[in-house]
Image: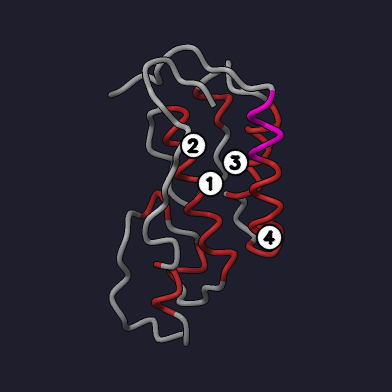
Amino acid sequence: IDVEGLDLQILKLIDFNAARALDGGNVDQLVAGKLAYMPPEQLRGETNSCSDLYALGGTLYFLLTGQEPEALSECDARQARADIGQSLTNLIKQLTVQDREARCLSLVEVKESLERASVNCKITSQPPHE
């Protein structure tokens, strides 16, 4: 993805397994993180590997739009920026869908979707900042 003035050749994610801290169903534990990046099941203490994908979708939405995703909602990046390609928009929507079973892709599938989206994606201006 080419965003003018930014080198996005290397992207590192941190806390990729943060949602797993609540595995075991003990909802009396502290829930850490921003609600905008938290899947609905994390609030119920019912996380699995698909929960991390929701946070990834929210992160991609922020990186492309410069806006925090709306908490507990499916993100539509094209509503925020019309120049974002449909394949990338579809991936972000799938990663942020509320039903974790519908969201659950393998990391290989996510990587392949990002690679396909980046072939035809060129965003030439920085996202607006609030």
Q: Identify the residue at horizontal 45%, vertical 39% (top origin).
A: 10
Task: State how far apart marks 3 and 1 are (Cα).
Answer: 5 Å
Locate residue 9, reporting x and y percent: 48, 33
Q: Residues within 10 Å of mark 3 (few under 14, many from 20)?
A: many
Q: Identify the residue at horizontal 53%, vertical 64% (top origin).
A: 51
Q: Are marks 2 and 1 in contact (CB under 8 Å)?
A: yes
Give the number of the disc on residue 92.
3
Locate residue 84, reporting x and y percent: 59, 22
Task: State how far apart marks 4 and 2 are (Cα).
Answer: 19 Å
Labels 1, 4: front one: 4
Mark with earlier residue (2, 3): 2
**Looking at the image, residue 56 lies above or below residue 86:** below
**Disc 3 marks which amino acid?**
Ile
Q: Circle 2 sits on which residue?
A: 61
Q: Circle 1 sits on which residue?
A: 57
Q: Are marks 3 and 1 in contact (CB under 8 Å)?
A: yes
**Looking at the image, residue 24 lies above or below residue 35:** below
Q: Identify the residue at horizontal 42%, vertical 15% (top origin).
A: 4
Q: Are marks 2 and 3 in contact (CB under 8 Å)?
A: yes
Mark with earlier residue (1, 4): 1
Over which residues does the magenta segment extend?
Answer: 114-119
Labels 4, 2: front one: 4
**Disc 4 marks which amino acid?**
Ser
The answer to if 115 sits in the magenta stretch is: yes
Mark with earlier residue (4, 2): 2
Q: Are marks 4 and 3 in contact (CB under 8 Å)?
A: no
